[in-house]
Image (spheres, rainbow, N blue to C red):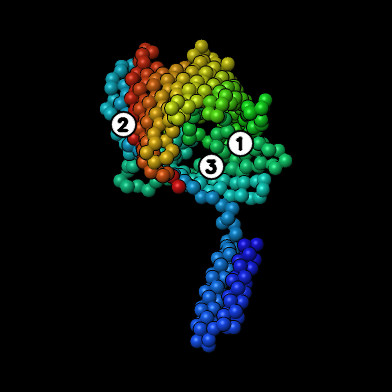
Amino acid sequence: MRKDKARKGILLIVGIAIVLCRLSAAQAGSDELGELKEQLAELQEKVTRLEAKQSTTEDLTLPEALKWAEKVKISGDLRYRHEHIDEETGTTTVGWKNGVDRHRIRARLMLEAIVNNEWDVAFRLASGSKDPVSANQDLEDSFSSKDFWLDLAYFNWHPKAMDGFNVVGGKVKNPFYKVGKNQLVWDGDLNPEGLAIQLSKPFLGEDQLFFNGGGFWVDESSSGVDTLLWGAQTYIKHKMGDSDYFLGGASYWDYGNIKGSGDLKSTWSDSSSFFGNTSDANMFAGDYDILEIFGEYGFKYDSMPVTFYGSWVRNLVASTNRDTGWLIGGKLNKAKDPGSWEVSYDYRVLAADAVVGAMSDSDFIGGGTDGRGHRFGFTYQVAKNVQAATTYFHDDDGTGAAGRNLDYRRLQCDLVLKF
């Protein structure tokens, strides 16, 4: 259409020039007529060049062999971290461990592809090890090469006939919503394996109703029953103006066949640890059916977004009375445009058998359950797609000698670059 309009404009210009030329011929001498013809020739040459240039631009398309590139998106990030840890240690006597300093990197490369109007696939490679709650690689071992692993690999089915409905399967992003992105139950790097359903629908006007559910394979056993995880979550987001909202809901997770099974951590690490959970004869002493109730409130203060949130969890079938955990926190402002910033804080208490320790935050008390403490965060947007961040943990680990709490301090300084 644009090309047709351009041609009509060109023909109009040429026609006007010819008419002017003929009118001038009736009144002008031969010299003036010659000059006018030269000007008309120059005009026609310019118009021809302009039309040729426009035609070339409009015809510039990818060849058929490269059409697939239009359906593929590549993204990724690199995080460089300096970390310092001070902690007390000891199960019989307690003493301070020498402070640990280490430099770490996390590198991730994501590929997302459109299969058709209803199906997508995605893959992500990440640095790290078999540990599912960390993609960090220490800079050590005499400049040794670092490992790269398959961190995500899933399909996403989103049928056009069911708006707001998604089915994902494979090694997937955690489908469950976490208020304030807290890690009371799940570490932020954990990507479960199985099938998940996500549904969002309008509810009572401008409100939105959400449901997330799924079944996941935790550990396959060749000699016994497999350890599985089933989960369901529902919540409502209620708008109270242009920026104010309240979100509230509940989650339920049921680990199948975990009681009496061996240490999950040993399946991906050389270390043997239950990460705070109660064990018996090197087996899980109890089952884990976890109920979570959560809420989040967001508003704006002097044009700055503010969020307060909280989460409460209880293991309904714990083998001990140490079955409860909770977290409260908040965030002020948002680091988005260059020069912007955000601050965050949360405080948590997590009893030994409230959640599965191997799956929860790997930074809090060094990973696992049976502790309490503060987390302080500050992020600054250095430039587009470049952030600097500082996080500080001030915790008490409850696994010390004679039930004494152990001090745990952790400082992380990050530089994150995304593309």
The answer for how far apart the CA atoms under marks 1 and 3 are is 12 Å
- Mark 3 is surrounded, within 10 Å at the Cα level, by few (under 14), some (14 to 19) or many (20 or more) other residues, namely some
- Mark 1 is surrounded, within 10 Å at the Cα level, by few (under 14), some (14 to 19) or many (20 or more) other residues, namely some
- Quarter occupied by residue 68: bottom right
The residue that disc 3 covers is 152
Residue 331 x %, y %: 44, 27
The residue that disc 2 covers is 84
The residue that disc 1 covers is 194
Residue 113 vs residue 203: left or right?
left
Taking depth in this image into account, of 301 and 85 the one nearest to the observer is 301
Residue 405 x %, y %: 36, 16
The answer to whether residue 335 is seen in the rendering is yes
Q: Quadrant of the N terminus?
A: bottom right
Q: Amino acid at mark 2?
A: His
Residue at the (54%, 21%) spot, across then down = 295
Residue 296 x %, y %: 52, 23
